[in-house]
Image: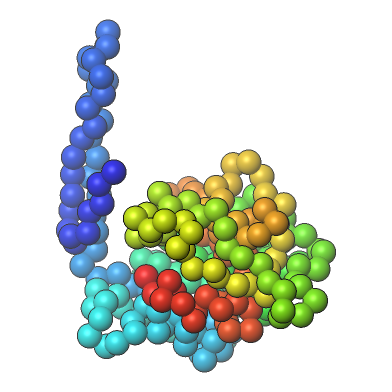
Amino acid sequence: TYAVHQPGFHSGYIDLAEDDLVSDNYRYFVFKIPDRIKILMAGETLPDNHLLELALKPEEKLNLNLEVNSVSRSSLEREEFGNYDVVILNDLKNLSEAILNNLGRYLETGGGVWIILGRNADRDFYSQRVTQRFFSTLLKKEEASPKDQAGFYQLENWDLKHPVFSIYQEIERKELPQLKFYKIHKGQIKPETKILAFFSGKNPALLETAVEKGKAMLLLAGLDTTSSDLSLHPFFVP
């Protein structure tokens, strides 16, 4: 595999082995890495976005290609998703009809969305209106948290070939951090949905799916310190 990091347009082709039909042995492609990546991050309140903001821009002079706009749920309807390269919905209780429509249009036209479901998320709402629609996934009603914080779920079986985790490919699995999650949402996943990581007990953790021209990812746990210790690890910083 080969990773491209330089901004701008990139093109190339794939040369297949020769066969009886030579004309279809080449496949050409072109893609663009933007000079600046515009990110819309929405939390239930602005302070809820603090940890994610630190991960994306730990210092003012770092990650200068990232332009992050942090908003609360109450002001999310005023945002046009099409103005951003990535939209992060960080553990919102629910989504209004206007936001759902905006989200659907954004994905259909090639947007990228990351949905995080933690303690704030209304499980029934997301199961009926979001995860079933975009991820072919139903959220189970059963209790999915250990009785106390002495027990936890671990993040296991990461897909280290996926770009999200590829930076850790050279690290032996036994050296990967032990990430603890104190509460998760359990999902009933259909085969067409790609699972990038599991929680212990073979519970899906991170899902990815294609929606028309766009892509969406779903994390079935929160990132706040009462939900997990993920933000306490260097792993949290991309």
What residue is shown at x 66% (from left), y 59% (from top)? Answer: 200
What residue is shown at x 48% (from left), y 51% (from top)? Answer: 159
Residue 156: give x, y in percent of width and height: 57, 58
- One can see residue 122 in this view: no
Is 227 situated above or below 8? below
Q: Which quarter of the figure is the C terminus placed in?
A: bottom left
Q: Quadrant of residue 55?
A: bottom left
Q: Quadrant of residue 143?
A: bottom right
What residue is shown at x 22% (from left), y 54% (from top)? Answer: 4
Residue 220: give x, y in percent of width and height: 62, 65
Asked whether, in this view, residue 220 is left or right of residue 18, the answer is: right
Residue 196: give x, y in percent of width and height: 52, 53
Q: Residue furthest front?
A: 174
Frontmost residue, 173 versus 55? 173
Q: Quadrant of residue 204?
A: bottom right
Is 228 situated above or below 186? below
Frontmost residue, 17 versus 128? 17
- One can see residue 220 in this view: yes
Q: Residue furthest bottom?
A: 47
Asked whether, in this view, residue 23 is left or right of residue 226, the answer is: left
